[in-house]
Image (spheres, helix red, strand yellow):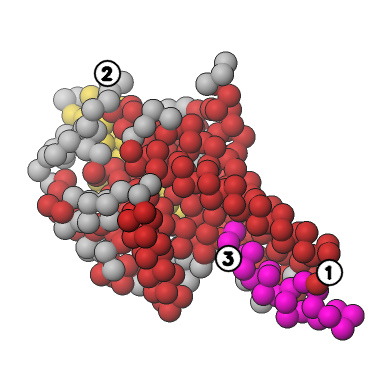
């Protein structure tokens, strides 16, 4: 990475941290649009910045740092990412422009569990019946589907060709799925014999199966970035608390056991950052090693986040277990991140296949 690019990304990080610290844990969507964060990767022709996923990764990390309630994962990482991966067709650029200006929110109904790593990513199918095209299927725990104006449904045709069908949310059954993490908005999306004969059917550019695989990898890495951000927030909060909390007439941070625990947290985070940044660069450049880099980052960063938030709760003592403390918010988010778009075990299994 050149020094100029590093400087630009660090400047973006500083601006993002400052803006989000003022906006709070539920930042206004139009505020993020006005900051240009919704169109970082989009081409200038549709109003974007023409940047890369490495800049998106910076924003995801900073959103994780404040445990933000935001549709950025569903609408930008997945939604705008999916639209950008499609062949240019009437309607696509218009929708993408609406997404990056904040006028429309788009969700993508991909598989979101371990099947996102090891199995078919398209939970929907299109079949011909009585001269009409019928869309059927269901996807669980779809990020930000309940707030979306459009849902992009990756589906398999009768010839097993992956396509993407844009559908107005009102035409689908969308059931919110509450989870332990109160900062995420997930929902089940169901298409029950939906007639899509008159609507557009969009095709991913190049190899359709590979395009869907890259989309799932984007989501997995974005979750890893989120975990990295929340881990840093917990380390910072724990160090501050250890400096302030007095026990036996001295700060608890002066005790060797607390020092060692904080050092362990820092080591875990340092390794996670190296893996996440390497994966973001590989994904942005489209290298052949990108999938493996993503799996290494996702499995390690999300496991590290669980370890770091657990230690943070322990080192905060009794107050760390109270509802008034924010530690439980980060712990719950880390727990969901560990499973979303593939558990550490699932990603390690994918890595193992490279050597099988």
Spatial CA distance of label 2 from label 3 is 48 Å
Residue 283, by quadrant, is: top left
Q: Position of residue 327 (x, y in %)?
A: 65, 67
Residue 156 image position (x, y, % from top left): 31, 27
Q: Which circle, 1 or 2, is nearer the viewer? A: 1
Pick the residue in front: 128 or 183: 183
Secondary structure of the magenta portion, mostly?
Answer: helix
Q: Would residue 23 be found to the left or right of residue 83 on screen?
A: right
Disc 2 packing (10 Å; few <14; some 14–19; many ≥20): few
The residue mark sitting in front, 1 or 3, is 1
Mark 2 against mark 3, which lies toward the viewer?
A: 3
Number of numbered callouts drawn:
3
Earlier-in-chain disc, 2 versus 3: 2
Residue most toward the right? 248
* Label 2 residue SS: loop
Tell me the quarter of the picture where residue 214 sits: top left
Q: Quadrant of residue 152?
A: top left
Magenta stretch, residue numbers: 231-253
Farthest residue toward the front?
3
Left or right: residue 161 compared with residue 320: left
Which numbered disc covers residue 233?
3
Q: Which residue is mark 2?
A: 159
Determine the residue located farthest toward the top in the rendered image. 356
């Amino acid at each position: 990475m050149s020094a100029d690019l590093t400087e630009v990304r660090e400047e973006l990080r500083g601006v993002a941290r400052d803006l989000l610290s003022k906006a709070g844990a539920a930042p206004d969507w139009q505020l993020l649009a006005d900051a240009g964060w919704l169109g970082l990767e989009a081409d200038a022709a549709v109003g974007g910045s023409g940047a890369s996923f490495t800049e998106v990764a910076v924003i995801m990390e900073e959103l994780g740092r404040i445990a933000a309630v935001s549709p950025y994962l569903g609408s930008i990482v997945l939604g705008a990412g999916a639209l950008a991966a499609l062949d240019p067709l009437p309607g696509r650029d218009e929708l993408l422009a609406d997404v990056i200006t904040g006028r429309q929110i788009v969700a993508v109904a991909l598989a979101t569990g371990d099947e996102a790593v090891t199995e078919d990513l398209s939970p929907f199918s299109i079949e011909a019946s009585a001269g009409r095209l019928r869309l059927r299927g269901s996807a669980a725990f779809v990020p930000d589907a309940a707030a979306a104006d459009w849902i992009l449904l990756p589906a398999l045709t009768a010839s097993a060709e992956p396509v993407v069908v844009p559908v107005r949310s009102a035409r689908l059954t969308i059931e919110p799925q509450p989870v332990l993490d109160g900062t995420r908005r997930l929902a089940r999306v169901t298409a029950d014999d939906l007639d899509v004969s008159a609507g557009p059917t969009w095709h991913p550019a190049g190899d359709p199966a590979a395009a869907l695989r890259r989309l799932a990898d984007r989501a997995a890495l974005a979750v890893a970035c989120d975990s990295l951000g929340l881990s840093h927030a917990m380390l910072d909060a724990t160090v501050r608390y250890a400096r302030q909390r007095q026990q036996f007439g001295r700060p608890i941070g002066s005790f060797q056991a607390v020092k060692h625990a904080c050092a362990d947290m820092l080591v875990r985070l340092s390794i996670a950052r190296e893996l996440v940044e390497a994966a973001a660069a590989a994904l942005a450049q489209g290298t052949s090693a990108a999938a493996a880099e993503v799996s290494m980052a996702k499995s390690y960063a999300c496991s590290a986040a669980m370890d770091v938030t657990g230690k943070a709760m322990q080192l905060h003592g009794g107050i760390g277990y109270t509802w008034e403390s924010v530690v439980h918010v980060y712990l719950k988010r880390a727990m969901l991140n560990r499973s979303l778009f593939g558990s550490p075990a699932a990603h390690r299994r994918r890595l193992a296949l490279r050597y099988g």
